[in-house]
Amino acid sequence: MKAAVVRAFGEPLVIEDRPGPEPGPGQVRVRVEASGLCHTDIHAAHGDWSVKPNPPFVPGHEGVGLVEKLGDGVTHLSLGQRVAVPWLGKACGRCEHCLSGWETLCEQQINTGYGCDGGYAEKLLAWADFAQPVPESVTAIDAAPLTCAGVTTYKALKVADVKPTQLVAISGIGGLGHLAVQYAKIAGATVAAIDVTDEKLELAAELGADLVIDARKHDVGEVLKRHGGAHAAIALAVNEDAFTAVNSGLRRGGKLVMVALPAHGTIQVPIFDTVLNGTSVIGSIVGTRQDLAEVFQLHAAGRTRVICETRPLSSVNESIDDVLRGQVKARIVFDLGAGR
Ligand SMILES: [Zn+2]
Ligand SMILES: [Zn+2]
């Protein structure tokens, strides 16, 4: 099978021919149809964060495909069934976090495409309990971005506890942001979309954003305050200044939900304003299996649209460059299902 492999941090990925992996007990082997490119994969390939993967490894945590082999003990999935293999490859199932509905915080979790090989390959292994069944009406290409970009933004809006009368600011309209706008609309909120490119602001408006703010031309905090201030701000742009800007546009009691992960990010949170205004800063990391099931359910019901472009896996290095240059409208999905 072909796989795009990180052999050393910061070097181009290498397309290798590898033997198909054998599923161990509790695992399944998935024949990948589609695999999304998430910014986290680039951080993984560059070794950007303090906790690093171990090269050689295969990145990718938006792999979607068909179950083609069952490991011992797997009874709830069947051959030919479409599943998604998310970032949360496995959690312990026994700790405080797992038992309280926060498996995404499990300290023993294994992350797909980081702690084990991921979806930039024709085949991948998944722990069956964490491989999410994809509803029949959802295509593999659509399911791929939903598997991280979708569930991550859906969860961020849950964490923000958005209500229908509220103003929600979505900072950064890309692979994540274009879905965040839609989830915020589904939650009934008034949505302010913030970005620095015309194309992405137009996309946000097309997807239902009530207000678009061009951060190149306007002071984001001021514009939000003119509209009463945001009850919640979802920070998705991989840029520290964007976090600071949107934080300054919160209303009293507002919540900043941090989602994007700049390589070395720090923001100044003014103590006086935070105390007097009773604002919160919250981190939100991906979502649980139940969150992903809900994301797929909404898509199957026709309530969300996935904007992506498909490319062959062989374009992996130029695709990464395009993402880093901000030249991708929403999401790149590697199409591995063609020509079979
Ligand atoms: Zn991701
Ligand atoms: Zn756990």
Image (tube, rainbow, N blue to C red):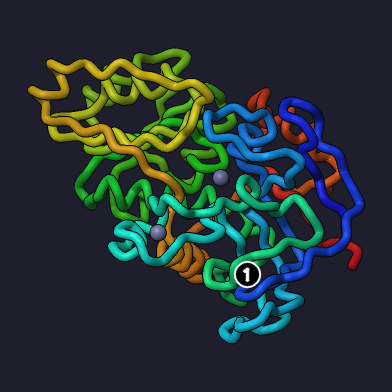
Name the residue rendered at 38%, 24% in the picture: 243
Residue 291 vertical placement versus 326 (above, below): below
> Where is the C terminus found, in terms of image quarters?
bottom right
Q: Quadrant of ligand 1?
A: top right
Q: Position of residue 115 (x, y in %)?
A: 61, 48
Task: From the viewer's perspective, tell me whether residue 222 is left or right of residue 50.
Answer: left
Find disc 1 in the rendering and name its residue.
83
Residue 183 in sight here: no
Secondary structure category for the residue under label 1: strand
Residue 281 in sight here: yes
Q: Give the residue type at disc 1.
A: Val
Counting the numbered discs, the total is: 1
Residue 252 vertical placement versus 196 (above, below): below
Q: Position of residue 210 (x, y in %)?
A: 36, 39
The furthest residue to the left:
276
The quadrant where residue 135 appears: bottom right
> Where is the N terminus found, in terms of image quarters?
bottom right
Q: Position of residue 36 (x, y in %)?
A: 67, 49
| Between 95 and 105, the one nearer to me in the picture | 95
